[in-house]
Image (cartoon, rainbow, N blue to C red):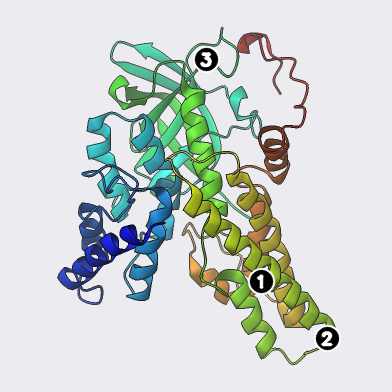
């Protein structure tokens, strides 16, 4: 990042804060003004929430706004922010960009991801949900699962099979699905925490206009890759302030605990070092990204962050001792939780179990890093050139 870029961005942020004081303005109004000022995603083009800069330059904006106590897009919008916006920007029409990006950033419209299926989990390209052309519309039938925030979402990123006679990676098409459309049914799935952040979604002759297609017919896998690469960055590329996030919670828990044994202190110090290494790696990755579509290296942060978060929450329970076995309530709640989960360490511990599954399992992350980053031989794939119809499914 050049000094010139910082000098150019700082006055824009100062003007935004002066014209829309964070303590006096409604958060959505502030976020709308941030979008209009080109400070939502500075690497997006002007008029679409950006200024045509590099992705790494966003760090300047985020730091200045955070220091000023400015509002951020609600945590329930993370899927839209991290995946919806990049995929619309990369593959959407001008009309779709104008329609979707601003309300997505302000949190007025929530997005969800409709990829995983009961018979196609880690092998997402094996999905069986179909979309059949009917004039200017597509008729969708099938089932998706583990769909976070589907119950509050306005739009869904839908991957569906449009040509079963093609190999599994070639016969899919990508759509923006209206989650309020007729034929879309959403059922909650209860987690180990008692919460129901995600759902299963059923499509029964649900219709989506062809105008809501992202990318060409049959090129859904290319659009899906854009989504998945950004998903890993969204989950594993969050840059916390030094000592922030879960490691900060662990330090505070240790300070309050009566047990100050050298063993616990040594464990905490080791976790702190790993968290700091991960933070610096995320900073370097953000500064070095020069295009809107991240590469497979984003899997590093996702893999390491998931495993580290699980170990940190385990440490927190050890610090709590017997109190760590207590749990407030398992009553089902369909409210996505944000930072308030840090105040409930047993719940944070249970929630962290999902970190190594959601957004791609740790095993999948290792495969990606091995094959696409380290250049190791890939797994044997006997179905690469066979049509989807011919491939056995469970």
The residue tagged 1 is: 346
| Residue 387 image point, x, y percent | 62, 9
Q: Which mark is residue 262?
A: 2
Q: Earlier in the sequence, mark 3 or mark 1?
A: 3
The circle on residue 171 is 3
Provide the secondary structure element on which disc 3 rests.
loop
- The tag earlier along the polypeptide, 3 or 2, is 3
Q: CA distance from mark 3 to mark 1?
A: 44 Å
Callout 2 crowding tier (Cα within 10 Å): few <14, some 14–19, many ≥20: few
Residue farthest along the bottom direction in this orientation? 258
Q: Nearer the viewer, residue 274 or 248?
A: 274
Can residue 193 be spotted in the picture? no
Residue 314 rendering spot, x and y as whole percentages? 74, 69
Badge 1 crowding class, 10 Å Cα cut-off, few under 14, some 14 to 19, many 20 or more, is many
Tag nearer the camera, 3 or 1: 3
Q: Residue at x 73, y 65 (%)?
A: 311
27 or 205: which is nearer to us?
Answer: 27
Q: Are marks 2 and 1 in contact (CB under 8 Å)?
A: no
Q: Quadrant of residue 206?
A: top left
Reply above or below: 286 against 383: below
Q: Secondary structure at mark 2?
A: helix
Say if 248 sits above or below 38 in the image.
Answer: below
Q: Report which quarter residue 120 is drawn in.
A: top right
Q: Residue furthest left?
A: 19
Could you tell me how far apart the alpha carbons at marks 2 and 1 are, in whole angstroms? 23 Å
In depth, the one of 229 and 45 nearer the eye is: 45
Left or right? Give the position of 157 relative to 165.
left
């Amino acid at each position: 990042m050049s000094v010139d870029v910082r000098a150019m961005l700082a006055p824009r942020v100062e003007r935004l804060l002066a014209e829309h004081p964070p303590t006096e303005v409604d958060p959505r109004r502030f976020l709308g003004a941030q979008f209009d000022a080109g400070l939502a995603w500075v690497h997006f083009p002007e008029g679409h929430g950006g200024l045509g800069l590099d992705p790494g330059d966003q760090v300047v904006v985020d730091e200045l706004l955070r220091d000023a106590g400015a509002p951020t897009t609600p945590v329930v919008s993370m899927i839209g922010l991290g995946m919806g916006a990049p995929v619309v920007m990369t593959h959407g029409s001008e009309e779709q960009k104008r329609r979707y990006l601003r309300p997505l950033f302000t949190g007025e419209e929530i997005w969800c991801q409709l990829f995983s299926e009961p018979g196609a989990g880690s092998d997402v390209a094996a999905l069986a949900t179909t979309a059949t052309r009917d004039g200017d519309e597509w008729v969708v039938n099938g089932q998706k699962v583990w769909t976070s925030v589907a119950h509050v979402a306005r739009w869904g990123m839908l991957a569906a099979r449009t040509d079963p006679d093609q190999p599994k990676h070639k016969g899919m098409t990508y759509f923006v699905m209206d989650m309020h459309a007729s034929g879309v049914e959403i059922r909650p799935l209860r987690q180990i925490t008692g919460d129901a952040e995600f759902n299963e979604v059923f499509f029964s002759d649900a219709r989506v206009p062809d105008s809501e297609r992202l990318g060409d017919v049959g090129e859904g896998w290319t659009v899906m890759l854009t989504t998945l690469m950004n998903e890993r960055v969204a989950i594993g590329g969050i840059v916390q302030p030094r000592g922030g996030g879960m490691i900060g919670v662990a330090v505070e828990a240790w300070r309050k605990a009566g047990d100050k044994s050298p063993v616990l202190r040594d464990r905490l110090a080791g976790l702190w070092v790993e968290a700091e290494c991960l933070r610096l790696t995320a900073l370097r990755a953000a500064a070095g990204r020069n295009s809107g579509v991240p590469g497979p290296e984003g899997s590093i942060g996702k893999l390491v962050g998931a495993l580290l978060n699980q170990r940190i929450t385990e440490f927190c329970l050890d610090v709590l001792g017997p109190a760590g076995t207590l749990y407030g309530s398992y009553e089902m709640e369909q409210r996505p939780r944000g930072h308030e989960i840090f105040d409930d360490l047993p719940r944070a511990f249970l929630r962290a179990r999902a970190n190594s599954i959601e957004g791609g399992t740790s095993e999948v992350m290792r495969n990606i890093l091995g094959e696409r980053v380290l250049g190791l031989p890939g797994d044997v794939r006997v179905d690469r050139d066979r049509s989807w119809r011919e491939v056995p499914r469970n």
